[in-house]
Image: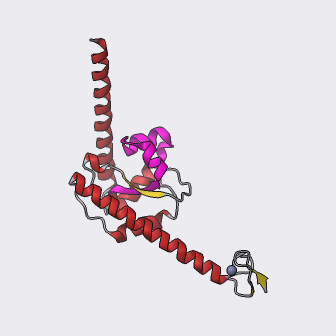
Amino acid sequence: MKVCTKCGTKTKHFYSMKRPHCIECERKDARYRMASLENRARGAFRHANRKAEQFGVANDLTYDDVMYLFKLAGGRCAYTGRFSNDLSLEHVIPMSAGGANTISNIIVVDISLNRMKNDRSFLEFIETKYNPYDVAPLVKLLAARGNRDYGGLYDELYEFQREECNAWYRRLMDKQKQAAV
Ligand SMILES: [Zn+2]
């Protein structure tokens, strides 16, 4: 017999005597975690669908895909590897730039990071902000999910990043030209 530190009941129903909560409490917690995960997945799925419609991009994302992505993330942000209570779907190539709403274009990241990143491209962001070696495993993961060739996907992302950088550079030059006039 042992006292559960959550409900205070004295019971012998523990998964293991090392655990602080009784079986009943652990089951309740697991059900709660599952329900909140499902809610988040549903919300994220609807949000992504609305945006896909708004931008008119290719869209084959299903609710099951989103559930799978959240479960796979195991509560961790794909950019930082840290645990987060507020995960969101991140389109590697933004839908505003024609990126598809499909599983091979999506990773799960902390929502604050998603905002911080703004419209910078995925590779640019991760290479300046984090260890560049992080890119290879992430691209590999995305390629596997989408049943795609790693090299092809990397090239596509790289091409996108380069175009973004060029666009950024052009904007900067225009600004300087205007300032010089
Ligand atoms: Zn309990």
Residue 55 vertical position relative to residue 12 in the rendered view, above or below: above
The quarter of the picture where residue 173 lies is top left
Image quadrant of ligand 1 equals bottom right
Horizontal and vertical percent for residue 35? 48, 73
Horizontal and vertical percent for residue 39? 43, 69
The quarter of the picture where residue 9 lies is bottom right
Residue located at (39% from left, 45% from top): 122
Q: Look at the image and say whether residue 3 sits in the magenta stretch.
A: no
The quarter of the picture where residue 107 lies is bottom left
Residue located at (43% from left, 57% from top): 88
Horizontal and vertical percent for residue 63? 34, 69
Residue 94 vertical position relative to residue 12 in the rendered view, above or below: above
Span highlighted in magenta in the image:
105-133
Where is the C terminus found, in terms of image quarters?
top left
Where is the N terminus found, in terms of image quarters?
bottom right
Total labels: the figure holds 0
Could you say which is closer to the camera, residue 59 or residue 7? 7
Could you say which is closer to the camera, residue 140 or residue 103? 103
Residue 178 vertical position relative to residue 149 in the rendered view, above or below: above
Residue located at (32% from left, 46% from top): 157
Residue 23 vertical position relative to residue 100 in the rendered view, above or below: below
**Main secondary structure of the magenta stretch:** helix
Furthest-left residue in this view = 56
Furthest-right residue in this view = 1
Horizontal and vertical percent for residue 144? 36, 62
Colour setting: secondary structure
Q: Look at the image and say whether residue 131 sits in the magenta stretch.
A: yes
